[in-house]
Image (cartoon, rainbow, N blue to C red):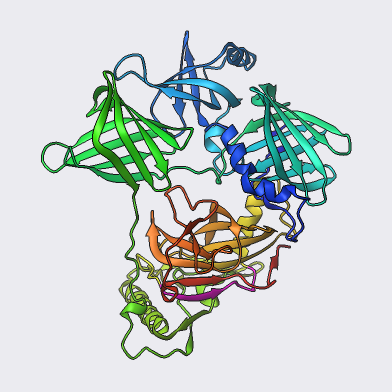
Amino acid sequence: MPLSRFVLSGLLMALVSCSSQTAGTSGSHAQVDMSAKLQKELAPLFRGTIQRQNEQATFTPCGSKQQWQVVMDDNFWQQWQQLGSPQTLQASLSGQLSAGEDRGAPFRLEAEQVSHITTDQSLCQDTGNTYLLKAGNNQPFWSIVIDGQQASLTTPNGVDSYQLDTVSRPTDKQLQLALVNTKGKKATLNLQSGYCQDSGTQQWLGYTVTLQLDDGQTLSGCGEQGTSLIQKQPAHDWQGHDDAQQADVSLILDSNYQAKMTYTRETGPTVTYDGVWQPQKNQTIRVMFNQRLGLPTHENIPFRWQNDTLTADYRELEAGKAYFDKPLVLKAKIGAENSTANTAAEATPDATSTAAAVVTPPALTEPPAGQQSFAQNETILNGASAAAATTTTAATAATAATAATAATAATAATIPVAAGTEQTQTVTAIKPPATASFSAGMLQASTQPDPAIEQALRQILQNNGGQASGTQYRYVKTDLNGDGSLDALVEMNWCDKSGCVWLVLQGNHGQYQQVGRLEGFSGTVMVSPVMHQGWFDLLTPSKDQENHYLVLAHDDQGYPARPAETSEQPDLNTLLQLRFDGENWLTMP
């Protein structure tokens, strides 16, 4: 079965009823722990290229130049032969990383479960689809995609949405998922480890799958594990201090499992370590080094991982454990937090009125023809914030005017006026400000469709087998990363009692690209002037505790799929509120 037929995105997995109905008592049970339990059953995936030379095989992670020794079982090499014994192929697999036999030797990856092997380059290039598991077949056609606690089943009869009810392992090599939908219909998905050829392609998947429906029908096919945005990943940059070494410590954990640690001493040389990292059970991350200042070494550091903190008690050396004088504590690196120019704190003394003022901010970039500018979202500000925003608006306009005056070149654009006619118009390019300022206030979800946003949504849905026509959404456009271009926060009308699905679209020259998918909340979203990894934090009120807020802080890979609770009470006068109220949904034609 061609993958394009049954690869559905995590978006379809959120197509559940917005009603308060639950499937008996199992719905709340699934939302409490089933997603987390499923994730525990699925080991982290390594994606990359396997190359075989004689009796040796190497693995190069996607986006990396490192080569690891890879150990595969006999069944894998049998599938290799059935694929024509290619010199290289791409694979996604889970396994254990360990140090090489000698000091400085390449790391060793011992595969435990292969999820996908193919002779083309699709695995390293396909970074847009996110899911925990997917399965299907082409004869007869069916597909199921699971992400979080939600599952989307597609058959010739249409799309049906389920939720995880139970997760179990009858045997070491079998995974069983019980599913139930809002109408009480049940299904059981059985995944058995073993190579399964994706019919009509040069691809093998890692599970043989059966899906038993409550009407007695049994569907069979192939399945694979994927990577989901909901899976918690450690931050990219970490910082701390080693008192005994009198050194600042930085640690970088790349998404392709490469690691670099740097010791910057108060006196003496800077020391760098290069290696790899791998998440372990019980919230532990093992960092392994085989290079120190470019010379061979053999050192491991097991870190305990708790949210934004890594803690290690010792290093593992060839001679044994070497304990730190006191635990080495590293904190997730915090991005710029001072992007609060022209906020209420800097307002003029006479700006004390509590009356609301309506301020129309300027467009940060020239909107393409047929698109709305930021000015079409009215910003409602109060008191000092209104004065601050007015100052910001004037300053931005002055900057644009200065840039326009200084411009010495004009671009001649040929603009079609009517069929068969053209006219030439001179357009002066105005460079936007290098960094957009932050202004507190409120933006209401737009009531007018945006062609560029709809084009992006249509592309996302079509790429993943979804139906764009009839899809409901609403959006607010604002600059979320301070680059001067308008981004968009889009709420999709795919909701359950925990909240809705949200898409973060990054704007670039009037076009949009998906850079995040969020879930687990609804209603007002607030943009904080605090930034992490170059993106403003997002806040939403907690439904469980009054005066508590949930925060989404960018971790260089993106916003987390679900917000984390914070006990800090933000100053509401410093926030930009994005209001998604009522039933003002837009419908795609």
- Seen in the image, is 404 located left or right of residue 54? left
Residue 462 shows up from this direction: no
569 to the left or right of 289: right
Q: Can residue 87 be seen here?
A: yes
Position of residue 482 relative to residue 330, above or below, is below
Q: Nearer the viewer, residue 134 or 282?
A: 282
Q: Nearer the viewer, residue 382 or 141?
A: 382
401 magenta-colored: no
What main secondary structure does the magenta stretch of the protein show?
loop
Q: Residue at x 65, y 50 (%)?
A: 11
* Residue 122, horizontal then vertical, whole percent: 57, 33
In the picture as drawn, the residue positioned furthest to the top comes out as 55
Location of residue 518 in the rendering, given as x and y in whole percent from the top left corner:
57, 54
Magenta stretch containing residue 448, yes or no?
Answer: yes
The residue depicted at 83 percent of the width and 33 percent of the height is 140
Screen quadrant of the N terminus = top right
Q: Which residues are magenta?
A: 439-449
| Viewport quadrant of the C terminus | bottom right
Q: Height in image: 216 above or below 545?
A: above
Which quadrant would residue 136 be assigned to in this image? top right
Asked where in the image residue 346 lies, by quadrant, the reply is bottom left
Residue 487 spot, x, y in % from top left: 50, 62
On the picture, is 39 further left or further right than 558? right
Residue 376 or residue 43, whichever sits in front: 43
Q: Is residue 282 above or below residue 94?
A: below
Q: Specify whether 383 is left or right of 524.
A: left
Number of numbered discs overlaid on the protein picture? 0
